[in-house]
Amino acid sequence: MSSTELPSVPATTALPKVAPVRVADGERLRSVGLPGITLSVRSRPPVREGLPPALYVHGLGGSSQNWSALMQQLEGVVDGEAIDLPGFGDSPPPDDGDYSVTGHARAVIRFLDAAGRGPVHLFGNSLGGAVSTRVAALRPDLVRTLTLVSPALPEIRVQRTAVPTALLALPGVTALFTRFTKEWSAEERVRGVTALCYGDPGRVTPEGFRNAVEEMERRLQLPYFWDALTRSARGVVNAYTLGGQHGLWRQAERVLAPTLLVYGGRDQLVGFRMAQRAARAFRDSRLLTLPDAGHVAMMEYPDTVARAFCELLGETGELAEGVPSGEPAAAGSFDGGGPVVDDGQAAAESAGS
């Protein structure tokens, strides 16, 4: 057992029967039982044997489905798996009720230790970015490279558009919000989330919108949905207050893995200005800036993010034999939207301009 793990606690509640989670063509979904947690794992069979392993970690309120587009882009580059963090997607709550950043990081570490797939190319978005940063700092043996899309790292001046999400961490706010929004349809909720997370909500296809509505309807039937969301939001806020070696910025400085940072110019949840600090904090960083992207660049511009990741692998010698540097597996145009900068200091200066 890893030193970051806690003893398992027996589950005390039965989970309700709800509609099955959507699985896209070419994807697989399986359940992995581990001490204290059960994780749902989404994967795509690699196009050939011998590709290096990758693991994708979603953000607050998200699920493994958030990575489907990027996983498809990279299926010829890595052998990818995306997990549903405890209490999200199709994963039930953790037995110990720990939704802190450390608790989620413990779940990732436990999964990687049990699977024996490490070191992996680790991807994280938002909350998943904070979780992946902590994993890379605590267990460098598990991480080959680190790709962070709008990571939820501490900000002194939080954007006004991010305040409602942060308020979910306060006692009583979730109950008030659920009463206020009890008449909202799943469609209205999805439109709100899309407007908050996408730089251009028009990039969501009609099929993608229908799938999101279906998933929202499924989640709202889960009795622990709001609890998982609230406690995880509180975990992010609490992580922001930690100092010393447990602080996320201090742990970012400890990350040894080559790191790709992706920031969107229209991100309403993570300040675009934080790209400057992040590029300085991670010692071996590259920065991809996408002025038109929002909080989920891997969903809005999966081909661009895939291309930048392939460039990272090419530069660090991690690209599998037979895969051209800078070329994702699935054909797609390079949208541009921002340069990949090799040097962290130069990236920071570019982001601050």
Image (cartoon, grey):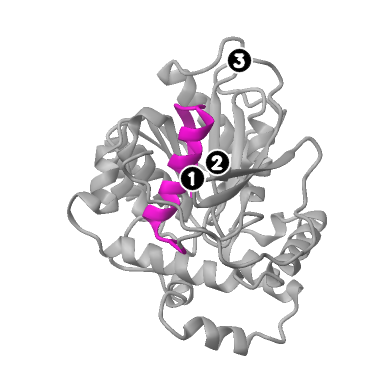
Q: What element carries label 2?
A: strand
The residue wearing badge 3 is 50
Splitting the image into 4 quarters, where does residue 71 fall? top right
In this picture, which residue range is highlighted in magenta?
A: 97-126
Q: Residues within 10 Å of mark 1 (few under 14, many from 20)?
A: many
Residue 69 in percent (x, y) is at 68, 42
- Is the Cβ of the residue at disc 2 closer than 8 Å to that at disc 1? yes
Image disc number at residue 56:
2
Q: Is mark 1 on a helix, strand or loop?
A: strand
Upstream in sequence: badge 2 or badge 1? 2
Q: How many labels does the image show?
A: 3
- Is the Cβ of the residue at disc 3 closer than 8 Å to that at disc 1? no
Upstream in sequence: badge 3 or badge 2? 3
Q: How crowded is mark 2: few (under 14 residues within 10 Å), some or many (20 or more)?
A: many
User: Does the magenta run of residues contain 117?
Assistant: yes
Q: How crowded is mark 3: few (under 14 residues within 10 Å), some or many (20 or more)?
A: few
Residue found at x 63% / y 59%: 200
